[in-house]
Image (cartoon, helix red, strand yellow):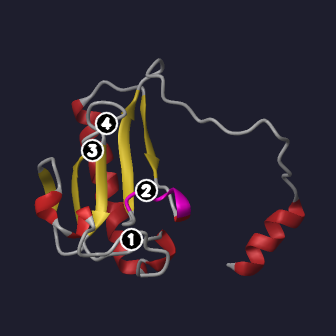
Amino acid sequence: MKGCLYDMKECIFCNKDKIATDIFYEDEFVMAFLDFEPINEGHVLIVTKEHYFDIDEIPDDVLSHLIIIAKKIVKALKDLYNADGYSIMQNGGEFNDIGHFHLHIFPRYKDDGFGWTYGEDKKLVNSEIAERIRERM
């Protein structure tokens, strides 16, 4: 698989028996379970059942289905926790530390300590950058 850091035979998400927490949702395309190192209680991972490394490798129908399941999980988390909000995130490329696509969903609280950090260098934001992205889409 393009960019894959791990052999699929060793991939934890390709081998359900290696997943340390209970799988609470599963269908032909995806499965969902609690993250074993949660940012907050209720931190969920949704993974594709077929091995994909990055989001741009996932067929549109599978990705659409994954987002529909993510929506249902967000609703469940809202019903279960009195959170101030939630976060959905996915790390790709070098930052995909598992080597298999996975989407994080977790409840958020105003003082939970989770934050968005980045370097202090000024970043460009302009129409030229937007146009270059648009041309490649």
Would you say 7 lies left or right of 127 here? left
Q: Main secondary structure of the magenta part?
A: loop
Please tell me whether mark 4 sits on a helix, a strand or a loop.
Answer: loop
Task: Please name the residue that numbered disc 4 is placed on.
Answer: 38
* Relative image position of residue 136 (x, y in whole percent): 72, 79
Q: Earlier in the sequence, mark 2 or mark 3?
A: 3
Magenta highlight range: 94-98
Dot 1 and dot 4 residues touching (CB under 8 Å): no
- Identify the disc placed on residue 23: none
Residue 107: x and y in percent read 36, 34
Picture quarter containing residue 23? bottom left
Determine the CA span between mark 3 and mark 4.
5 Å
Residue hosting label 1: 64
Q: Is residue 133 left or right of residue 59?
A: right
Looking at the figure, which quarter contains the C terminus? bottom right
Identify which residue is drawn at 84% across, 52% down.
125
Which of the 4 quarters of the picture holds residue 27? bottom left
User: What's the mark number on residue 97?
Assistant: 2
Given contact means CB atoms under 8 Å apart, are the residues at marks 3 and 4 in contact?
Answer: yes
Q: Earlier in the sequence, mark 1 or mark 3?
A: 3
Marks 1/4: CA–CA distance: 25 Å
Element type at mark 1: helix
How far apart, in angstroms, are the residues tagged by discs 1 and 3?
22 Å
Query: How far apart are labels 2 and 4 at the CA level?
Result: 15 Å
Which residue corresponds to mark 3?
35
Residue sitting nearer the eye, 47 or 69: 47
Q: Position of residue 80 (x, y in %)?
A: 22, 32
